[in-house]
Amino acid sequence: MLDLIATQALVERAQADAQKEVSRYKARIDNAPTLARDELGKEYLPQIEGLQADITTITQERDQAHARIEKLGVAVSLGIPLKNAATFAELLQGSNPDEYEAHAEHLLELFRKAGR
């Protein structure tokens, strides 16, 4: 779980750094004299687009890490032993903690029935 938290912190830091770099490039373009703006835009546009793609990727990775943390929290809160919690959390489907919990309860009920 600490790895997931550390990963989320790294992703958020990288996202902030990339966003700052995009802002710097945009500021340079916006502050350029009118006659040079088109030329600067052509020069920096690929870099800006690349950084925006990086931000998108980093945001997706952050969201995935956050979902893994939420799923793990649901597994632990329902009493899944720590040694099995990560594996159980990977089974959970949904898009928010309430849906993860509902699916977890459904799985637990299925496992209980299968164990009879």
Image: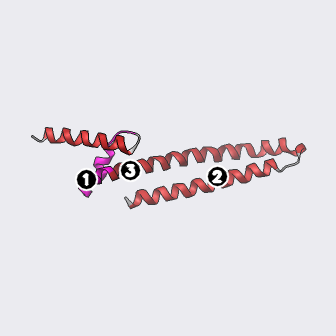
Please identify the quarter of the rendering in which residue 46 is found: top right
Q: Is residue 49 left or right of residue 66?
A: right
Q: Amino acid at mark 3?
A: Glu
CB atoms at circles 1 and 2 under 8 Å apart? Answer: no
Residue at the front extreme, as displayed: 98
Q: Return the residue nearer the eye: 16 or 77.
A: 77
The image's mark for residue 70 is 3
Q: Residue at x 48, y 47 (%)?
A: 63
37 or 63: nearer the viewer: 63
Instruction: Kindly state the secondary structure of the residue where label 2 is placed.
Output: helix
- Of labels 1 and 2, earlier in sequence is 2
Marks 1 and 3, the one that precedes in the sequence:
3
Residue that badge 2 annotates: 19
Residue at which label 1 appears: 84
Give the CA separation, mark 1 to mark 2: 38 Å
Q: Secondary structure at mark 1?
A: helix
* Label 3 SS: helix
Question: In the rendered view, does 72 fall on the left or right side of 18?
Answer: left
Q: Residue 79 location in percent, x, y?
A: 23, 53
Q: How is the image coloured?
A: secondary structure
Q: Is disc 1 surrounded by few (<14), some (14 to 19) or many (20+) residues within 10 Å?
A: few
Whole-angstrom CA distance, mark 1 to mark 3, is 15 Å
Magenta-tinted stretch: 74-94
Q: Nearer the viewer, mark 1 or mark 3?
A: 3
Tell me the amino acid under the disc marked 1: Asn
Q: Measure the C-alpha gap from mark 3 to mark 2.
A: 26 Å
